[in-house]
Image (cartoon, coloured by chain):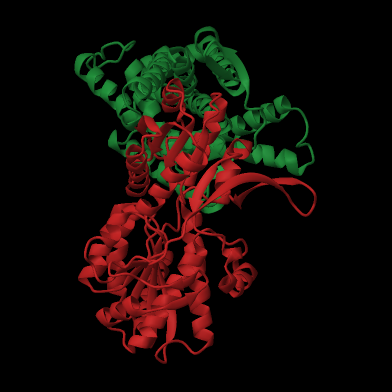
Amino acid sequence: MFLQQLINGLTVGSVYALIAIGYTMVYGILEFINFAHGEIYMLGAYLGIIAIGLLTAMGLGNSSAFLLLAFAFIFAMVFCAFYGVTIERLAYRPLRRAPRLAPLLSALGVSIFLQNFVMVTQGTRNKVFPQLFAQNGFDLGNAKITYIQIMILVTSILLMVGLTLFVNKTKMGKAMRATSQDQKMAYLVGIDVNRVISVTFLIGSALGAAAGVMVALYYGLVNFHIGYTAGLKAFTAAVLGGIGNIPGAMLGGIILGLVESLGAGYLSSEYKDAYAFIILVLLLIFRPQGILGERLKERS
Amino acid sequence: MKKSLIILCAFLIGGLISNCQQKKENLTKIGVCAPLTGDQAKMGNDILNGVKLAVEEWNTKGGILGQRIEIATGDDRHDPKEAISVAHKMVNEGVIGVIGHFNSSCSIPASFVYHDASIPQISPASTNPQLTSQGFKNVFRTCGRDDQQGSIGAEFVINELRKKRIAVLHDKTTYGQGLADEFKKNIGKSNRASIVAYEGIVQGSGDYKAVLTKLKSRRPEVVYFGGVYPEGGLLVKQMRELGMKAIFVSGDGVIDPEFLRIAGDAALGTFLSFGPSVKEIPHARHFIESYEEKYGEIGPYSVYAYDAANILLSSIQSAGSTDGEKISEAIHNIRHEGALGTIQFNANGDVLVAPYIFWVVKKIKTEDGKEKLNFVPYT
């Protein structure tokens, strides 16, 4: 049973991690919580379904599951990246110099707007994601790992490795790190800060969309309010790992998934959602900067 | 910019005025309260359509007490807090009776509001025993009760399925936990089966593998679930993904085509307790034909809502008044021949006969030769 709970926890955790990255990247650079990020994840899930619906309508519904899935991922990630950048342009950039509360409220507004937009255009009923994979998988002793779980784990690891390489090895990555350290200085040495911020939203949203498609595939069920809880959990994961710190968000997500899964398995599943927040409260008391976070320097 | 603002204001004020005028018209209003949006919206709209059909039929016959009947809708979004405010809204709009709500967790708190205003309330779907045990003379339901359903479920598992190791899950709602508890109590009374696990799950969380893994280690032969179809579908699907072979048994909250869509083939062999098939009730033929013509596929609660609306309207007719207390009295005395058969109420406001049968999920051949999952009465 322990191994099975571990597998369950890792699967959910890697999804949390992918969403948490979006929160943490934006926070690292703009120092505000993009509360609309959970909705980007929800949009990703819907776009995944739409992508597969489109292919089916074009008569390609019977091609291999891998191709369908690849298309769903790319479609959702590209669209959501576009959404993310647009939201930044319309709702956050005009408020860049406003008091810190203003973009936060703007983010909440965007979140409510997106949720209702999807509710009105897609309807209130649950959408069922078409089953692309067989439900079976491998037996590992007493435990079972399904193909979808393997796919989720592998995809998340690939995306996270890709992101780490991007941030640490490319010129854009360097510009992002510089901007997150000091926006004004980065601007003075000739970094196009606006572009860096756009790229941040682009990447964060694309990862959120990937998480959305994977969850839609995993549970097979999507509705317009899944972004809320998922966003809250991923935000917790980001704070857990140390907000603003990318490896921290990944670690936080995985820990959160494991805590939830083991808590539900060995204690009681009635309080499954509470475990995440109990951990958060404890952490905020004893290590407010998060597991991998650094203590914030005083800002003048 | 300014101009458009002025126009907007004009529209808003215009809207207010026309609203006021509507109130003066000679109308009899009845309320329909259910989750009309959100993840249980389908159930809510099934109920609304059932009532609409009844109201249209009455209106073509000339309305009631010489007045046209109109429906006031209230969307409680299966949220108890929302249900209270919707109930107040109904009272303020001056409805004469209410059909609703869907969820027990909404019907019960709302019933206080209707009781204070002495407005008759007939729920087509709330099965929690508490609803009609509060001593309210104005509260009724056309469906059965969880204690009846829970004990029939327990009896079925012990005598029909002959299984011994039973796990119980519920969704922590008034309905889900109420049903699960009644089931558990009745299993406990028997010495031929035992409860190996009893757990609550979080509605809307989507991931139930952790709790199912825990269940799996207890090796249950039957998993009984008290809850509604989105979670029911996900649970049975994730059970099969984990390689659990236990039989999935649940109640009327799960019996919906959406359950089959969510669970897919994993739903095969699931047993669900519910009322008898509408198609097998001779009185229901007229209802089936007109409903399908107007609204398409009949939902599980459409007929309960249709009969509830007819009972309410006939009682207003026979009471000859729009006074809530007189109507409630008339409902208590009614002997209604409806689509569900003969309905009479006991002193609590429950139906005298609450027939529950078991349905099983099977693959049936459709007209075009394809196989399709469907609910079939179990015999």
Residue at figure coordinates x 27%, y 63% from the top left: B111
Give the number of marks: 0
Q: Is residue B157 above or below residue B123?
A: above
Using the rendered view, name the quadrant where residue B21 is placed: bottom left
Q: Going by the image, does A152 lie left or right of B314?
A: right
In the rendered view of the protein, which quadrant contains the N terminus of chain A? top left
Q: Residue furthest top?
A: A169
* Nearer to me, A61 or A183: A61
* Nearer to me, A71 or B58: B58
Residue at figure coordinates x 48%, y 24% from the top left: A15
Q: Is residue A233 above or below residue B76?
A: above
Q: Colour of chain A?
A: green
Locate residue B190, reporting x and y percent.
36, 38
Residue B132 in view: yes
Using the rendered view, name the quadrant where residue A243 is placed: top left
Can you tell which chain is drawn red?
A: B
